[in-house]
Amino acid sequence: MTPLSITTQPVASPHAHGGNSVGRTMLRVQFALVPATLYGFWLYGWPSFFLWLLTILSCLGFEALSLKLAGNARVRRTLFDGSAVLTGWLLAMTLPPWAPWWVAVVGGFIAIVIGKQVFGGVGQNVFNPAMVARVALLVSFPLPLTLWVLPEPMATAVPPDFITGLRIFLTSLPVPDAMTSATLLGHTKTELARGTDLLHALGNAPALSWVGLRAGSFGESAALLLLAGGLYLLLTRVITWHAPLGVFLGVALPAALAHGIDPARFLAPEAHLLSGALVLGAFFIATDYVTSPNTATGQLIFGLGVGFLTWVIRSFGGYPEGMAFAVLLMNALTPVIDRFVKPRVLGRDRKGRPLDIPENA
């Protein structure tokens, strides 16, 4: 081969493929969600399983329909890359465990069609699809989206059996008052609105729990299992530590400061860290490749913004939980962060100027 043929023939770029793929990444994230999901089934029984299953099937169905209507020739390959399954899985984790069937179907439509496919499909969406659906459902249907049930492990005699659970899920039977409960964030928000300070309101408030024995969404309460799943994603390098750490610091620092100044008005940091979807959001939502910044510094800024906005909404907003709103707001700021926080180009300094490298170096 002559030097001329080397310069005239097209060659591949000097890059090596790491062996990763969309499907493999999605599978690892789903694997990390398995412990908290199985524990949610055990806590909330058959209705939670039906909710999880129908939410995922709805996302797959609307994904297939969207691809067909768009004339995509690779429907099967795109459908089973795991992205639609993960979107439905994460959405189900943020829903009340005994939500009716139509919440799963409407949520799947909003997440896939409105939150993802209208932008061009996987990798093109501006906002996290699961959080788009969660916020839309909460704003449109606040009653079923804020109806929480007490965890009744399946080892006891209280949870409904398979047939009763299916009837509850399909017919939207009212939940008995004895099985409903407020979340800690909802309880404190209500008591503060009534003029009761936290020093008195927390006396009969729902207890915090690392192991999920509290009312809340289907998959958000088992903080220890979600933390274990997040550590698995860190160890396998699916995610980095920047966004999760930013989320935790963004919540804990202002919460500690505000609680130290006025403990009768603001919850302690540990209450924020163990309540709502904070752990789920820090490891599984704020780390979304598509809707978060590209650089490590940008991801840290993104996480700090998500955490701080979550605390602001929880403390001053109209809704007890603010994770989904905070994620969407920071998703909108991701292009701005990427514009001002850029990776250093090889051979140049942070300002883009060529490095002065000696020729004999």
Image: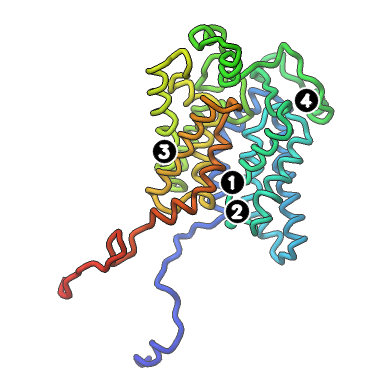
User: Residue 295, image x and y in percent?
Assistant: 40, 52
- Look at the picture and state if 121 lies above or below 241: below
Residue at figure coordinates x 59%, y 48% from the top left = 127
Q: Name the residue under label 3.
A: 246
- Look at the picture and state if 333 lies above or below 354: above
Distance, label 1 to label 4, CA atoms, is 30 Å
Q: Mark 2 points at which residue?
A: 125
Residue at figure coordinates x 56%, y 26% from the top left = 221
Which amino acid, mark 1? Asn
State the residue in front, 141 or 17: 141
Element under label 3? helix
Residue 41 in sight from this viewpoint: yes
- Look at the picture and state if 50 lies above or below 187: below
Residue 68, picture quadrant? bottom right
Tell me, yes or no, whether the two marked residues, 1 and 4, touch with CB atoms within 8 Å.
no
Classify residue 340 as left or right of residue 353.
right
- Binning the other alpha carbons within 10 Å of mark 2 as few (below 14), some (14 to 19) or many (20 upward) gives some
- Binning the other alpha carbons within 10 Å of mark 1 as few (below 14), some (14 to 19) or many (20 upward) gives many
Which amino acid, mark 2? Asn
- The circle on residue 128 is 1
Which amino acid, mark 4? Gly
Distance, label 3 to label 4, CA atoms, is 39 Å
Q: Name the residue under label 4.
A: 165
**The C terminus lies in which quarter of the figure?**
bottom left
Element under label 1? loop
Distance, label 3 to label 2, CA atoms, is 23 Å
